């Protein structure tokens, strides 16, 4: 496969997942601010912007309007939903000849809502629901119409790396508001994990249990470990070599080591400093993205989250 096509498929997967998960994070945080009047809005908004890689001016006032502009509406903000969906469409245009017609139409129609101004006219919570539905349409169309060739594996690799990164950001935002069950309940709902979590833990809601489920559950598709496992499988399929010892692929080594550390470390150790642990996870996924870029995308530079310290 041409490196240009491989890169486009990888970033379609990442950008669509990024838009969806940013909408999930914003949905949780806006609902939390509306339902709990005791929460310091400015502190919460600053923490959210920091976790999403946006560093605001210390002396400027930060409120939910600014957060929505930077993370949802602004086409110039590199971490906004509008920017991610526009970038997904641009990647799809570059790989137009390899996409099925229904998949191209799903991505292009989604982008048209942004360029026409319809996206900017929507307000929470309707906008978050719309983004989730459009992402589900794009991903479902890809699942139903793409052959399971290299293009599919690059699409899934991008989706899984982004999902691991974004789930860690959801966990980090919940940990900053720890002390009540509400943030974790909202986070579980944002991931579509609430009912699955209750069945797994037999109705017992705890912060530790919610974090364990979102980080370590091997069967839930939005957990970090599940996403890392799938990313490793995609790299295995792309390598297609009879490996007898070690890993030649740096991205596979990074992701495999990260997954192993999460699975075999004590959960108490991870919970002791959850925000920093999640930041370390995000740095590793950024390094894995750079390794994928060096291995498969000739002449390209890795696109990374703004503000992630490497």
Image (cartoon, grey):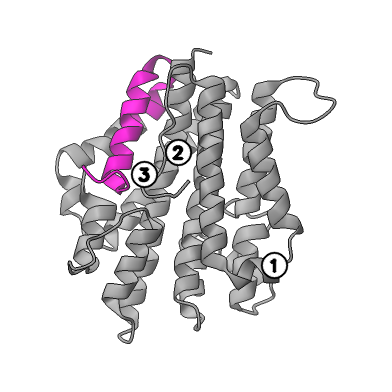
In this rendering, position of residue 210 left or right of residue 45: right
Helix, strand or loop at mark 2: helix
How packed is label 3: few (under 14 Cα within 10 Å), some, or many (20 or more)? some
Task: Looking at the image, tell me whether mark 3 or mark 1 is earlier in sequence order.
Answer: 3
> Residue 256: where, in percent of width, then height?
69, 42
Q: Are marks 2 and 1 in contact (CB under 8 Å)?
A: no
Please identify, in this view, whether the residue under mark 2 or under mark 3 is nearer the observer.
2
Residue 282 relative to residue 251: left or right: left
Q: Tell me the residue at 17%/37% (across/down).
A: 115
Magenta span contains residue 51: no
- Could you say where residue 59 lies in the image, as x and y percent from the top left? 19, 68
The residue tagged 2 is 14
User: Under tag 3, what secondary structure?
Assistant: helix
Magenta residues span 76-105
Q: What residue is shown at x 39% (from left), y 27% (from top)?
A: 102
Single out the residue that lies furthest toward the bottom.
38
Q: Nearer the viewer, residue 183 or 278?
A: 278
The residues tagged by marks 3 and 1 sit, at their Cα atoms, a distance apart of 35 Å
x 74%, y 66%: residue: 266
Q: Marks 2 and 3, Cα distance to the nearest angstrom?
A: 15 Å
| Disc 3 to disc 1: CB gap under 8 Å | no
Q: Seen from this angle, which residue lies furthest right? A: 244
Residue designated by label 3: 134
| Residue 267, numbered circle | 1
Image spot of residue 254 (x, y percent): 64, 40
| Position of 177 relative to 114 (above/below) | below
Q: Considering only vertical position in the picture, is 266 above or below 77?
A: below
Q: Nearer the viewer, residue 137 or 261?
A: 261
């Amino acid at each position: 496969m041409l490196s240009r096509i491989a890169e486009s498929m990888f970033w379609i997967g990442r950008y669509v997942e990024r838009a969806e998960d940013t909408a999930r994070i914003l949905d949780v945080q806006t609902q939390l601010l509306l339902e709990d009047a005791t929460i310091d809005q400015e502190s919460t908004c600053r923490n959210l912007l920091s976790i999403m890689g946006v560093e605001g001016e210390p002396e400027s006032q930060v409120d939910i309007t600014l957060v929505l502009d930077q993370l949802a509406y602004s086409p110039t903000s590199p971490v906004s939903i509008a920017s991610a969906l526009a970038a997904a469409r641009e990647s799809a245009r570059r790989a137009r000849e390899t996409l099925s017609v229904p998949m191209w139409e799903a991505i292009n129609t989604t982008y048209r809502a942004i360029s026409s101004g319809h996206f900017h006219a929507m307000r929470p919570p309707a906008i978050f629901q719309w983004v989730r539905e459009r992402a589900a349409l794009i991903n479902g169309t890809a699942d139903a119409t793409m052959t399971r060739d290299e293009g599919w594996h690059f699409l899934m690799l991008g989706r899984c790396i982004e999902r691991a990164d974004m789930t860690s950001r959801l966990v980090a935002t919940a940990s900053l508001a720890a002390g009540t069950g509400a943030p974790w309940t909202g986070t579980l709902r944002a991931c579509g994990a609430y009912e699955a979590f209750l069945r797994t833990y037999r109705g017992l809601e705890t912060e530790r249990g919610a974090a364990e489920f979102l980080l370590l559950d091997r069967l839930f598709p939005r957990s970090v470990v599940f996403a890392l496992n799938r990313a490793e499988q995609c790299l295995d399929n792309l390598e297609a070599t009879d490996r007898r010892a070690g890993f030649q692929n740096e991205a596979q080594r990074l992701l495999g080591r990260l997954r192993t550390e999460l699975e075999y470390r004590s959960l108490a150790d991870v919970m002791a400093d959850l925000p920093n642990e999640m930041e370390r996870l995000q740095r590793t996924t950024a390094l894995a993205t750079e390794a994928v870029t060096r291995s498969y995308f000739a002449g390209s530079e890795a696109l990374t989250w703004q503000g992630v310290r490497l």
